[in-house]
Amino acid sequence: MSNNTVSMSAKGYYSLSVLDNFGKVKKTKSVGNTSNVVTYVGAYQSLIASSLFAGNYAAVGTGTTEIARSSTALGAESGGGRTGGVGASRGGNEVDNLNGTSTLTLTRNLSFSLGAKVGTFSEIGLFSSSSGGVFIAGQLIKDEFGDPTTITILSDEQLIVTYTIEWTVPNTSNLAGTGTVTDAASNTYNYEIWAQSYFSAYAVGSSDQQVRYFKDYNQLAFRGANGTSDYGISVDSANTWSVSHDGSGIVTATADSKTYSPTEITFTDVVYIGFYTFSGTDSRSDIVDTGSDLAASSTNVPGPAVYIKFLNPISKNDTESFDIGLSVTLNI
């Protein structure tokens, strides 16, 4: 079996502005757009565990060590709390890169209240919560030459943080693996695993923010060579994706395996098998574009994160059992 890792990436930058007590920007204290590190744990939190669009919180500190992707906190976060804000939505902030990916540019404007931060600070960070939480991104404060510097905030001044992160995600299907299985009668079936678009509704610029990677599934959909013949069958409401992150950018998602008894399901021409979340059999409207191996765009329930595609149709009669399991690797 061969495996190709599905990749998603992120980069970002921040800027700092200081206002006086009349709300006027103090140009001598402003910091222009500065490159920013999106941490491994931050990418996992945003892309998989939570949402790209969730509220995030800015913090400042006095640490002097360069932030790395493996960092899990600022060097020395200052007291006095953080300030939060919700990111921009998907609609109007997504660009098609014309290479099978889209980039979403999401900006958060995070304002500390007047006098909330007083002192000299050397680092800035973005977190998933107002306290504790996951360290999404951060970096030392730097001057126009890229050298570490500091910013001093007085009691009659206000710090404004503008944080932008660019997330690049797949907007089409990608070949993620190949292999071969053999049944009890020694029939051999070659298969491919096709990873799907990140968003369930994959039209670039859609306002729908439902994500396919990786939502609980309660049914498998078995589909014929035409992409529409439906052998969908309920699995179990407790079935899910078990997702783990190694802390270094590798995410492994494993679908709970399922064994079908001889009489539980039969089929003769199955080519596609997808892991779906369905509210009922009436929701089985998602089909496969057989020309692109792209699952149908869906705005009501998550489409599958992956499809299994058999290159020669697979069959099962009422005297055979059928076992299925799946694992997918992502690089974030």
Image (tube, rainbow, N blue to C red):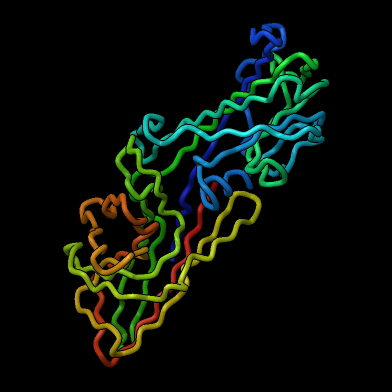
Q: Position of residue 329 (x, y in %)?
A: 50, 57
Quarter holding the N terminus? bottom left
Residue 144 in view, yes or no: no
The residue at the point 40 percent across, 82 percent down is: 259
Q: Position of residue 78 (x, y in %)?
A: 80, 32
The residue at the point 63 percent across, 29 percent down is: 36
In front: 9, or 210? Answer: 210
Q: Position of residue 319 (x, y in %)?
A: 28, 93
Residue 59 in view, yes or no: yes
Q: Position of residue 183 (x, y in %)?
A: 33, 83
- On screen, residue 155 versus residue 131, left or right, reads right
- On screen, residue 141 versus residue 303, left or right, reads right
Query: Count the marks: how many?
Result: 0
In front: 96, or 202? Answer: 202
The residue at the point 81 percent across, 31 percent down is: 63
The residue at the point 35 percent across, 38 percent down is: 207
**Would you identify the image quadrant in which residue 33 lies?**
top right
